[in-house]
Every structure is written in structure tokens, then in C-alpha cells.
């Protein structure tokens, strides 16, 4: 279903290279109501940090000039990606070539998918006023195309956990196994201006960076299976044995992501992933939606149960929402959290 949109993705947006405050920038426009903040902050991913404005409201150079500007750094594979937004439908990527944009950013940020058509398809399949309102409120959300192993591992960690702690555990695990990508790319200063990392123009010291973990690559499955004890310092709790089992099954080939991708089936994806100890329908559905492009996947957690009970009479046939039910799930999830003043 994605490939139908992917074939002509360049028709979905415009792009141009420029400079903003001495930073090489690639500006992408024509993205409809794409909301960078809603996409990152909706609970689908954990490897990002907002760098402008920061938690104390400080803005960087572009932020001072662009009212309402927000910028994030995220880790995609072996790349640190810096992306900002001033207004809906426009993304600004910094320090990236057009080739890197096409190969990394287009798929990861779902820029090759026509979400206006997806929204129309969802609304054709419902008469729920609540869902219609949710679709309007959350229509700027896009499903990020995440790495299967990283998404599976992250959602195992998410069980009975909150987002700040999930991010903290993932950063600690990444620092324990991964590579310092800021150092690898020759950066002389912490790119996210963390006090523990900023060396005032000197070569980055990997010791303080390891206490932060934001800029580290995600560990490979075989690295975890070879040295599972390194997980312990991140305090994963009961999830430890689940993470180890996942690493062992993936690294051994008992769970084949290549086969899952080739099957391109939500049911098959779930049936394979639940073979991993501690992975149930919810975790498997999250991985299906956020990593394997099964856009019909409909994860149900406590927020979705609350929404179904309060606004759908305790029953919601998600299959009736069609092949993009997972996007509808994100609309509902975001909307009910907003109604509950959860950001």
C-alpha cells in the first residue's frame, strides 16, 4: 500500500538548498499539514531530543528569528539528523546532502506517502464524530519508518513504562553498546548542548557523553546477545529477560525480519514477533505499525482502551476502518491525550 504512493514521491513536495544562519539547509515545502512536533511527540519513537526551544525556553539562532520555530535532533541508523519546522507543511533539514535526504529522510519521515489521501480513506470508513474530530486534531502526524530491530527492542522496553524513562533506558543501552556518532562525525562540541558533553571546542570526551547517550548508535541484536550483561546498568527490570530473548532470536535468525518484510502481512508479522518472550499483541502491533509498514495495525494500550470505552461505547471494530486503521489509531491516541492535557 505504501509503494503506490512511493513511486512518485517527488510530486508530493518541493525542496531547495540554502543557508540559514550559516547552516547548510535543505528546505522541504508542500507537505500539507505535516506537524514535526506531533509526529515526534506522539509516542511512536524515542530517539529524539528537542533542541530549540530547549526545556528552559532558550532558542538557537534560527529560533530567535523564526517565531514558533521548533527543532529536533534524532538518530536514524548511523546519522544524526537535525530537522526544524516553522509552520505546518515545511521541514528544514540541516547539514544533509540531497542524496542523504532521498535515501534517509524521505523514507524515515514518510515524505513519500500521501497522508491527505490516507485521511480521506479513513473518514470514508467511519461515521464517528469523535474520530472525525480526532483526525482534524492529529492530521499532522506521520508514521515514521523506523528500523525493525530498534522499534521492537524499544517497545519491549515500553511495557509498563513512561516515555521519559523509556528514553533514558534506551540512551543508556545505546551508550553501553553503540558508537558515539558525534565523535565519529568529527564534531568538536556537543550538538545538543548538553552540559555533560560540551567541551568548549575541544575534542569530545566519550566518558561524559556515555552518561548522556543521546548521540550514540543503536546496538545491534548480536551485540546484545553476545554481552547481555551490559543491559543491566540501564535498569530494564523485568524486561531484561525479554530483551535478551529478542536479541538471541533475531541474531540467530529464528526471527527473520527479511521474511517478515517479504510477507508484508500484519497477521504474519504479529504471529512471528509474539514468539519472543514477553512480546504480546500490543508490542507486536506497535512494531508492525512503526517499523514494518503494516498501516492496518491497531495497537491497544490503556489510552486506547479508555478512548474505546468512553467514545465508542466499549467496542470499536478497527478492521472496519480499512487499510489505514493504524493511522486512525494515532489520531485517536493523540486526541485523547490532548483532551486529557497530556503532552
Image: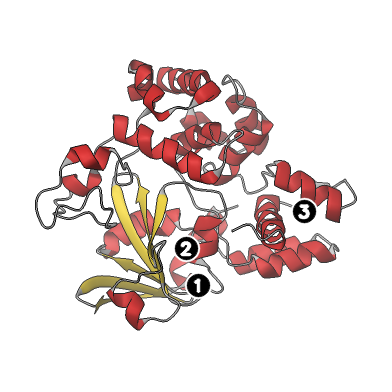
- Residue drawn at x 9%, y 52% as measured from the top left: 202
Q: Which residue bears the numbered disc 1?
A: 31
User: In the drawing, does residue 16 fall left or right of residue 308?
Assistant: left
Looking at the picture, tell me which residue is in the foreground, 184 or 324.
184
Residue drawn at 51 percent across, 75 percent down = 88
Task: Decide which of 58, 280 is in the foreground and name it.
Answer: 58
- Is the residue under label 1 in contact with that under label 3 (CB below 8 Å)? no
Residue furthest toward the right? 313
How many angstroms separate mark 2 from mark 3 (CA)? 23 Å
From the top left corner, tell me how far across and down residue 177 is, in percent: 30, 30
Q: Is residue 338 visible?
A: yes
Q: Quadrant of residue 231?
A: top left
Name which of mark 1 and mark 2 comes first in the sequence: 1
Percent of width and height locating residue 327: 65, 55
Front-most of 293 and 298?
298
Rounded to the nearest angstrom, the CA distance separating label 3 from label 1 is: 24 Å
Residue 246's place in the image compared with 40, above or below, is above
| Structural distance between the alpha carbons of marks 1 and 2 | 8 Å
Whole-percent x, y for residue 215 in the image: 29, 46
Q: Mark 1 or mark 3, which is nearer the start of the sequence?
A: 1
Asked if the residue under mark 2 is in contact with the one under mark 1, i.e. CB atoms within 8 Å, the reply is: yes
The answer to whether residue 318 of the structure is visible from this angle is no
In the displayed structure, would residue 1 be above or below residue 277? below
Disc 2 crowd, CA 10 A, few/some/many (<14, 14-19, 20+): many
Q: Secondary structure at mark 3?
A: helix
Residue, far left:
202
Decide if residue 128 is on the left or right side of residue 49.
right
Q: Which tag, 2 or 3, sits closer to the chain's start?
A: 2
Q: Count of labels shown?
A: 3
Q: Which mark is residue 111?
A: 2
Residue under label 3, please give it.
321
Q: Is residue 247 above or below residue 54?
A: above
Amino acid at each position: 500500500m505504501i509503494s503506490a504512493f512511493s513511486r512518485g514521491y517527488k510530486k508530493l513536495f518541493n525542496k531547495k538548498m540554502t543557508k540559514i544562519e550559516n547552516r547548510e539547509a535543505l528546505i522541504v515545502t508542500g507537505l500539507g499539514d505535516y506537524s514535526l512536533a506531533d509526529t515526534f511527540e506522539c509516542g511512536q519513537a524515542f530517539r529524539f531530543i528537542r533542541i530549540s526551544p530547549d526545556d528552559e525556553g532558550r532558542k538557537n539562532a534560527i529560533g530567535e528569528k523564526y517565531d514558533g520555530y521548533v527543532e529536533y535532533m534524532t538518530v536514524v541508523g548511523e546519522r544524526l539528523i537535525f530537522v526544524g519546522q516553522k509552520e505546518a507543511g515545511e521541514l528544514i533539514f540541516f547539514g544533509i546532502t540531497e542524496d542523504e535526504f532521498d535515501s534517509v529522510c524521505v523514507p524515515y519521515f514518510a515524505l513519500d506517502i500521501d497522508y491527505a489521501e490516507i485521511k480521506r480513506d479513513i473518514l470514508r470508513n467511519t461515521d464517528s464524530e469523535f474520530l472525525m474530530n480526532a483526525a482534524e486534531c492529529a492530521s499532522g502526524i506521520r508514521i515514521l519508518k523506523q528500523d525493525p530491530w530498534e522499534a521492537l527492542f524499544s517497545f519491549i522496553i515500553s511495557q509498563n513504562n513512561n516515555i521519559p524513562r523509556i528514553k533514558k533506558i534506551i540512551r543508556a543501552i545505546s551508550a553501553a553498546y553503540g558508537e558515539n556518532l558525534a565523535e565519529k562525525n568529527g564534531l568538536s562540541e556537543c550538538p545538543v548542548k548538553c552540559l555533560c558533553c560540551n567541551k568548549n571546542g575541544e575534542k569530545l570526551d566519550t566518558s561524559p557523553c556515555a552518561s548522556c547517550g543521546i548521540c550514540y548508535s543503536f546496538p545491534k541484536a548480536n551485540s546484545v546477545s553476545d554481552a547481555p550483561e551490559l543491559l543491566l546498568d540501564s535498569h530494564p527490570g523485568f524486561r531484561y529477560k525479554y530483551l535478551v530473548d529478542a536479541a538471541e532470536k533475531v541474531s540467530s535468525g529464528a526471527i527473520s525480519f527479511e521474511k517478515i518484510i517479504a510477507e508484508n502481512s500484519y497477521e504474519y508479522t504479529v504471529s512471528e514477533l509474539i514468539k519472543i518472550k514477553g512480546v504480546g499483541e500490543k508490542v507486536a502491533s506497535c512494531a508492525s505499525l512503526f517499523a514494518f509498514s503494516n498501516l492496518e495495525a491497531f495497537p491497544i494500550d490503556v489510552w486506547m482502551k479508555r478512548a474505546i470505552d468512553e467514545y465508542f461505547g466499549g467496542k470499536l471494530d478497527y478492521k472496519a476502518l480499512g487499510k489505514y486503521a493504524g493511522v486512525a489509531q494515532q489520531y485517536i491516541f493523540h486526541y485523547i491525550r490532548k483532551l486529557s492535557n497530556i503532552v
